[in-house]
Amino acid sequence: MLDLALIKPRLMGPNFKRLLKSLSLTKWRVSKDCNITYRTLINWQAGKTTPSDELAKRVGKYLGLIGPEDAEIRDIEEQIIALKSRLDRIKEKRVVKNK
């Protein structure tokens, strides 16, 4: 299972700066290729904000921190959770209706 808690610290503060340097990438290039604002990346590097799960997956995949199959597994797990929640709500409605 993909643990974003292990990925997010690599996308923040000096870790993020070192990672980009090691890959010869700029924040501008990452922002354009990942369709997120440059300001967001500046805030991550400054430690002002933490990446959301969605952005951590997107940037982590782009930077090679997450393999394509890891991202796909995470997406499927999120869909399963959403479907279970939806199923629970439907079951609750049935119980209330049958009373």
Image (tube, helix red, strand yellow):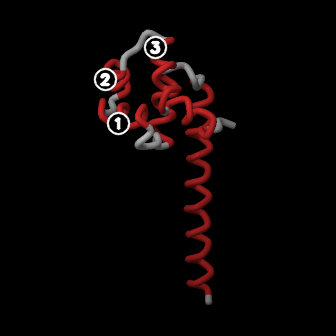
Name the residue: 49% across, 33% down.
12
Label 1: state its secondary structure: helix
Q: Which residue matches tag 1?
A: 40
Amino acid type of disc 2? Answer: Lys
Amino acid type of disc 1? Answer: Thr
Label 2: state its secondary structure: helix
**77 relative to 38, above or below:** below
In the foreground, 45 or 28: 45
Name the residue: 65% across, 38% down.
3
Q: Which residue matches tag 2?
A: 32
Q: Earlier in the sequence, mark 2 or mark 3?
A: 3
Is residue 57 found left or right of 3 in the rendered image?
left
Q: Earlier in the sequence, mark 1 or mark 2?
A: 2
- Measure how far apart labels 1 and 2 are at the Cα level: 12 Å
- Crowd around label 1: few <14 · some 14–19 · many ≥20 (10 Å): some
Residue 81: image location, x then y, percent = 60, 53
Residue 26: image location, x then y, percent = 37, 17
Q: Are marks 3 and 1 in contact (CB under 8 Å)?
A: no
Amino acid type of disc 3? Answer: Lys
- Measure how far apart labels 2 and 3 are at the Cα level: 17 Å
Q: Which residue matches tag 3?
A: 21
Name the residue: 56% across, 69% down.
89
